[in-house]
Each structure stands twice: as structure tokens, then as C-alpha cells.
Image (spheres, rainbow, N blue to C red):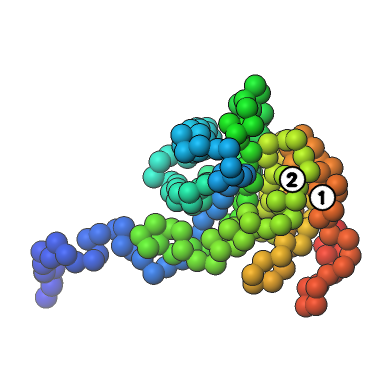
């Protein structure tokens, strides 16, 4: 005897009726970009100046993401006061994001700063990483966010920006270096990225730094890894350092 299918009307509150909830509690691969304005709170900068700098940076970042063909639903921005953290859908190519948020952003900064008084100049530190995150409700929660924030705040990156007249210094994690920088996707030149050991609260991390327009800045800042490694950290020489 044939069996008739029996259907029931689902309750509107049934979780299966809300596709957005399917990702709750499950990790999502995301690209993370963190940016920080140098000396945001320094004396000589007024609140109106800080507001202009924040708005300018946010406008640039939105345009860069748009240029990378990232729709507004594919990225989320968290304001950090003197910068931002972006969590971006992994379908947006990471080599494109790296080029836009380092090379192209550096060019925009150089043009913007011409003729500006010092308090009005905009200089940035930029960090990039990738990894799994959880939503609460936005995809920004997990170790990957901690890592990108630690890299952004690392003294090796601050040192690079301190020794150059260029407006931007960048740092990438081992994940980004291995999968993007080292592969040399045009126009990325791996020879312009320098290996460093970034001291963090959780211990030292392998990372790579780059200053567009001043590729020797990391060496002048004396931050390039030189063969002295903390206990428990393998010799990067085996990785071609």
C-alpha cells in the first residue's frame, strides 16, 4: 500500500525556518584586516581633526572593499576608536585585499598628506590574518581576531613606521605570508617583505613586515629576525628566512 506523505505547518519560531541561524556555534573562515591611526590621541590633535581622520579612513576602506567586489553583506566593520577591524568573506581574494589595503591605501595616504599640517596627516599600521571565527552576532569572535590585534599592536610594526617618512607599515601573519605573499601573486613582491618575531602577550609569533615605498625600513628599525629565537620557537631558517 502506498504511503501518503504527511506535511505539517512549521512554527514560525522553528530554528530551521531561519537559515541565518545555521552558522550559530559553527566556525567560519574569515579574512581579518586591522587598521590603526598613528598618534590618534596625541597632543595637537583636536576632536574635529580626529573625526575627520576617522571618516576619511572609513571612506577609503569602504571604497577599497567595493573595488575588491565585496558586497556590503560580505564584510563587517568593528570600530576600535582609532581604527577598525574588518571581518571579510573568504570568497573575496586575499591577494586582492592585501594589494588594496597596503599598496593602494599607501598611495592614497601619500596624496592626502601632501600639504597637510602635521596634526592633519594620516599614517597607519595595518595587519592581516585569516582564520576561523564565531558569530555573536557578527563573525568577529575567536583566536584569529586576537592574533590580528596582537600583530597590529606589535612593537616590530610600530618600529617600522617610526623610522620612515612613508605613511603606512604593514604586517601579515604566517598564514597570509605562506598562502599569499610567498606565492608572489602580482603585484606582490615577496622580496619586499621581511621576517620578524612579533612579541605578543601569548608569546612570540612569526610574521612579516612591509613598508610600501621604503622596503629597507624594517632593517633600519632593527626588527628583522636575525637568528636569535626565544625558547620553544623553531629556527625560521628551515622556512627560508
Give the labeled residue for mark 2.
162
| Residue located at (40% from left, 62% from top) | 135
- Rendered position, 92 above or below 15: above
| Residue 66 picture location, percent across and down | 48, 34
Report the residue that reaches farthest toward the top.
Answer: 115
Q: Which mark is residue 221?
A: 1
- Quarter placement of the N terminus: bottom left
Q: CA distance from mark 1 to mark 2?
A: 8 Å
Q: Position of residue 231 (x, y in %)?
A: 80, 77
Pick the residue in front: 4 or 234.
234
**Circles 1, 2 touching at the beta carbon (< 8 Å):** yes
- Image quarter for residue 212? top right
Q: Residue at x 78, y 78 (%)?
A: 232
Specify whether 180 is left or right of 84: right
Q: Nearer the viewer, residue 170 or 48?
A: 48
Q: Residues within 10 Å of mark 2 (few under 14, many from 20)?
A: some
Amino acid at each position: 500500500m502506498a504511503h501518503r506523505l504527511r506535511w505539517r505547518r512549521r512554527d514560525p519560531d522553528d530554528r530551521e525556518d531561519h537559515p541565518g541561524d545555521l552558522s550559530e556555534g559553527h566556525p567560519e573562515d574569515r579574512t581579518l584586516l586591522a587598521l590603526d591611526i598613528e598618534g590618534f590621541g596625541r597632543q595637537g590633535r583636536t576632536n574635529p581633526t580626529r573625526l575627520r581622520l576617522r571618516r576619511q579612513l572609513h571612506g577609503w576602506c569602504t571604497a577599497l572593499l567595493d573595488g575588491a567586489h565585496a558586497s556590503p553583506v560580505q564584510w563587517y566593520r568593528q570600530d576600535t576608536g582609532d581604527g577598525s577591524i574588518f571581518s571579510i568573506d573568504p570568497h573575496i581574494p586575499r591577494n586582492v585585499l592585501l594589494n588594496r589595503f597596503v599598496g593602494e591605501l599607501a598611495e592614497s595616504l601619500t596624496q592626502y598628506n601632501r600639504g597637510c599640517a602635521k596634526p592633519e596627516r594620516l599614517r597607519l599600521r595595518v595587519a592581516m590574518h585569516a582564520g576561523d571565527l564565531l558569530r555573536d552576532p557578527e563573525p568577529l569572535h575567536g583566536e584569529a581576531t586576537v592574533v590580528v590585534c596582537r600583530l597590529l599592536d606589535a612593537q616590530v610594526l610600530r618600529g617600522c613606521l617610526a623610522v620612515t617618512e612613508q605613511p603606512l607599515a604593514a604586517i601579515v601573519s604566517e598564514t597570509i605570508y605562506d598562502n599569499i605573499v610567498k606565492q608572489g601573486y602580482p603585484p606582490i613582491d615577496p622580496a619586499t617583505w621581511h621576517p620578524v618575531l612579533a612579541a605578543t602577550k601569548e608569546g612570540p609569533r612569526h610574521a612579516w613586515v612591509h613598508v610600501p615605498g621604503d622596503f629597507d625600513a624594517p632593517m633600519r628599525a632593527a626588527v628583522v629576525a636575525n637568528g636569535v629565537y626565544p625558547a620553544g620557537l623553531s629556527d625560521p631558517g628551515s622556512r627560508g628566512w
